Amino acid sequence: MIAKAAKSKTLSTVRRNGAGRDYDVADMNLAAQGRRRIEWADEQMPVLRRLRERFIKDQPLKGHRLGACLHITTETANLLRTLKAGGAEVLCCASNPLSTQDDVAAALIKEYDIPTYAIRAEDRDSYYSHLRAVLDRHPTVTMDDGADLVSLLHTDYKGQADELSASMEETTTGVIRLRAMERDGALRIPVVAVNDAQTKFLFDNRYGTGQSTLDAIIRATGVLVAGSVFVVGGYGWCGRGVATRARGLGANVIVTEVNPIRALEAALDGFQVKTMAEAAKTGDIFVTVTGDKSVLTAAHFQAMKSGAIICNSGHFDVEIDLPALKKLSKSVEQYPEREVESYQLKNGRQIFLLGQGRLVNLACAEGHPAQVMDMSFATQAAAARWVTSGKRLSVQVHNVPQAIEDEVAAHKLAAMGIKIDSLSSDQKKYLHSWESGT
Ligand code: ADE
């Protein structure tokens, strides 16, 4: 029989603190530690800090209630502080049951007076009760990482759609869900695809996921990456980042893909490209990062070497077929302090699963570094300023305006002390002309 998963810490009822505000977090005693770590991260987020200073003066979000459903990390705390500094009333919940940093959640309430509903390792009921707690407060702007809040708004909270100026979406998977809603005529609010801004996906998805995924695998297992056979399922921006960083640590990287262009790109980037069925036989470490379900299935588990490490860095825990893994196993041992489970297969082999198949970089490490979240969250904050600055946007999926991307990139370069050239008027003219040739 499969042993029970590590017990979830779950408080399904919402408590009230002394100030009469609602919240639900694991341990308020962690607040001071949370504040120290939030301030540390803030030092690495100069673009967001600069925006915060402007927000304090301009108060662009005054009169808005902003409900954020994001990973509760030190970087997110700095985004929420910025939105609050801009005049918004801010409240938040977790966007994944296993990504919450409990010290940050406590600090948000105690140190920054931001109502927070998030407990690491909460169960599904608690997770959804927290989303409901945010929607019950009738936000006028929302932020999502995976579109769970917007999905709930379109089902159980339909009547509130007109109250929303817009919602911002942080991740690829969420944008895919929102575009599907738009295509099916189901979308009822304006949304902004923050993920699709270059200042987000080129850096956060690639360098953030690349580093934090390797960080998580190493923290959880202490494995030597050099010389290992490292299989990356998916060669989108996140997959590129993971494959590149694994190679940088000396792994022999195999990429699997379903898209011929991406497969070719991976091959020309110097990676081996194989089917997952082939890769399963030789891989030591497997990372799924496709955004789709059933990337690692029963046939793959059966083919894997004993001791194979498997994990997922895609948004939802659907990429590894966990029910199939459980069915193939006679027992499972827990290493809860490391978020590792060892599945003892009936074929006599064992497979190590990290982070319960959830986003490994947040389950087994602390997510992307602050330097990269600086750009993502400065883009988020500037997008929030944009959606509240005039009349309501049309109901569709909007891209982040180029001016915001340019502003964020310019400030990041300045903060990094990097100067770049600019075009002369002659060069500009040349680029706009067609007459001159050979
Ligand atoms: N997504 C990935 N890493 C993150 C982080 N550090 N904070 C918030 N969201 C994230």
Image (spheres, grey):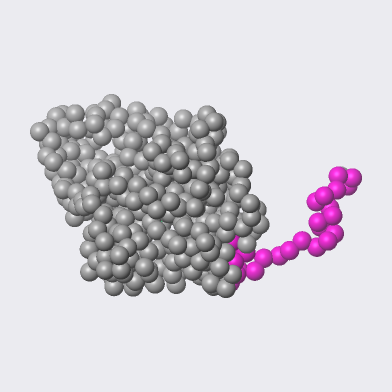
Q: Is 418 included in the stretch rendered in magenta? A: yes
- At horizontal 36% and vertical 57% (from top left) the residue drawn is 72
Q: Nearer the viewer, residue 1 or 253?
A: 1
To which quarter of the image does residue 311 belong? Answer: top left
- At horizontal 51% and vertical 66% (from top left) the residue drawn is 87
- At horizontal 19% and vertical 44% (from top left) the residue drawn is 341
Query: Above or below — where is 84 with respect to 301?
Result: below
Say if residue 20 shows up in the picture. yes
To which quarter of the image does residue 50 belong? Answer: bottom right
Give the image location of residue 325, x and y in percent. Answer: 23, 32
Q: Is 9 included in the stretch rendered in magenta? A: no
Q: Quadrant of the N terminus?
A: top left
- At horizontal 88% and vertical 47% (from top left) the residue drawn is 436
Q: Nearer the viewer, residue 293 or 106?
A: 106
Residue, far top: 299
Q: Is residue 58 left or right of residue 318?
A: right
Q: Is residue 301 left or right of residue 159?
A: left
> Magenta part of the protein: which range?
408-436
Say if residue 375 shows up in the picture. no
Query: Above or below — where is 166 with respect to 283?
Result: below
Q: Nearer the viewer, residue 374 or 157?
A: 157
Give the image location of residue 119, x and y in percent. Answer: 27, 55
Give the image location of residue 335, x and y in percent. Answer: 16, 50
Give the image location of residue 115, x and y in percent. Answer: 35, 61
To which quarter of the image does residue 80 belong? Answer: bottom left
